[in-house]
Image: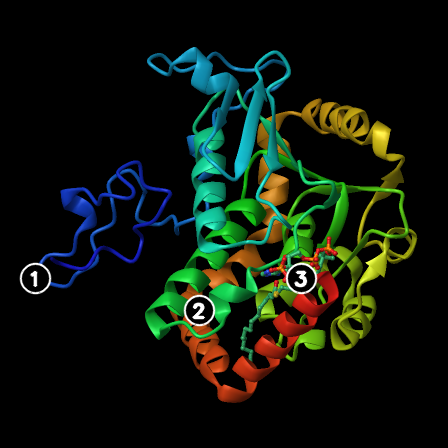
Amino acid sequence: MFPVSPNYGSGCPCFPTPCAQAVLGSTSTPVPCPALPACVPPGVLPLSRRPPAWGRAARQPPGLPLALARAFSNNKILVELDESSGVATMKFKSPPVNSLSLDFLTEFCISLEKLENNRACRGVILTSAIPKIFSSGLDITEMCGKSTEHYAEFWRAVQEMWLRVYGCNMVMIAAVNGSSPAGGCLIALSCDYRIMVDNPKFSIGLNETQLGIVAPFWFKDTFVNVVGQRIAERSLQLGALHPAPEALKLGVVDELVPEEKLQERAAAVMAQWLALPDHARQITKSMMRKTVLDRLISHREEDIQHFISFTSKESIQKSLRMYMEMLRKKSG
Ligand SMILES: CCCCCCCCCC/C=C\CC(=O)SCCNC(=O)CCNC(=O)[C@H](O)C(C)(C)COP(=O)(O)OP(=O)(O)OC[C@H]1O[C@@H](n2cnc3c(N)ncnc32)[C@H](O)[C@@H]1OP(=O)(O)O
């Protein structure tokens, strides 16, 4: 079996079974899957793939079953598309705490890709079906006591999720209806707008240092782009989890609403954003985010190697085990 092109990923229509062009021949020259233009890194859609649909939702592409376009759910994420507004909702439903396991991340990327390829969809609201939890962040069990191959696969999936959300042409709104530490916070930060339930019991932040681990540079870049250098520096070093009212003050989220108004408010904000011409908004978004995206894209393999060597250290494994133990004691 030949290795596949480095451009091959869940963005390719032939995923997870690589087509002939996605497989590297004996020349070892990378041949990208034909569905992905060579200049486009995995996870980042070229602007030309999304036709402008300003003012109305575009028509359903022929051949796609209507039911699929309206709602689909594999296992951990429920996706509903309202074709009249062009807005989809992705509801995380992976009990107990929507942790970002390899399976979750894979399903997330496939679901988002389906929406990206559906011309009827122009915006996505991310929210949770689990009471009180948006997402508990990366699934710590994926980082404990596993093989280096597993760490590499897991980290590539984390990178892929971020590249897809941060580089997404559609309007992305996070409707944060519960706690959102670390990787959960990253998902929200990667959206265009964040609305959180006004409840001080729900907190959000990049708390990696509390686990004895370090938020990677692209987590940090995303955070800095939202709240600025000073707030990000203090919050990151302290591994702070900000209760909702504090998160609003610091700019981690854009607004707070009562729980019962969250979905209605997210739909209203989405309508405001969709009132703009798609092409102008998309080019502006891409211009604002390109430098940060490019940094990971050009250092992707290096970043995976960093993750593997960092995570494999006995001291890090010990910290993660102790943290899991602390969570278990608290819950049990
Ligand atoms: C030089 C630089 C090199 C770069 C190296 C890179 C290093 C890695 C960077 C990693 C980046 C991001 C990391 C993360 O995202 S780590 C995850 C951080 N998340 C947390 O800290 C949250 C932990 N969870 C909680 O605080 C709480 O669970 C909650 C979310 C507030 C919910 O509270 P609850 O009371 O409702 O539920 P609880 O009883 O605590 O939990 C229920 C069960 O779920 C288990 N669990 C919770 N969170 C996780 C998780 N993130 N992963 C796996 N499992 C989790 C918990 O243990 C309970 O299980 P059980 O019922 O006891 O079996």
Per the image, the residue denoted by label 1 is 26
Q: Secondary structure at mark 2?
A: loop
Residue at horizontal 76%, vertical 41%? Answer: 177
Q: Across the whole image, how many numbered discs are drawn on residues? A: 3
Closer mark to the observer between disc 1 and disc 3: 3
Height in image: 330 above or below 52?
below
Disc 3: which residue: 182
Disc 2 crowd rating (10 Å Cα; few below 14, some 14-19, many 20+) is: few
In this rendering, position of residue 312 left or right of residue 25: right
Q: CA–CA distance between discs 2 and 3? A: 21 Å
Q: Earlier in the sequence, mark 1 or mark 2?
A: 1
The structure residue drawn at horizontal position 21% and vertical position 45%, both measured from the top left corner, is 18
Report helix, strand or loop for mark 1. Answer: loop
Q: Which residue is mark 2?
A: 299
Whether tag 2 and tag 3 are in contact, CB under 8 A, the answer is no
Q: Secondary structure at mark 3?
A: loop
Assign the N terminus to one quadrant of the image: bottom left
Neighbours of disc 1 within 10 Å: few (<14), some (14-19), many (20+): few
Beta carbon of the mark 3 residue lies under 8 A of ligand 1 = yes
Identified by mark 2, the residue type is: His
- x 24%, y 55%: residue: 5
Q: Classify 29 as above or below 287.
A: below
- Measured as percent of width and height from the top left, residue 216 is found at 58, 70
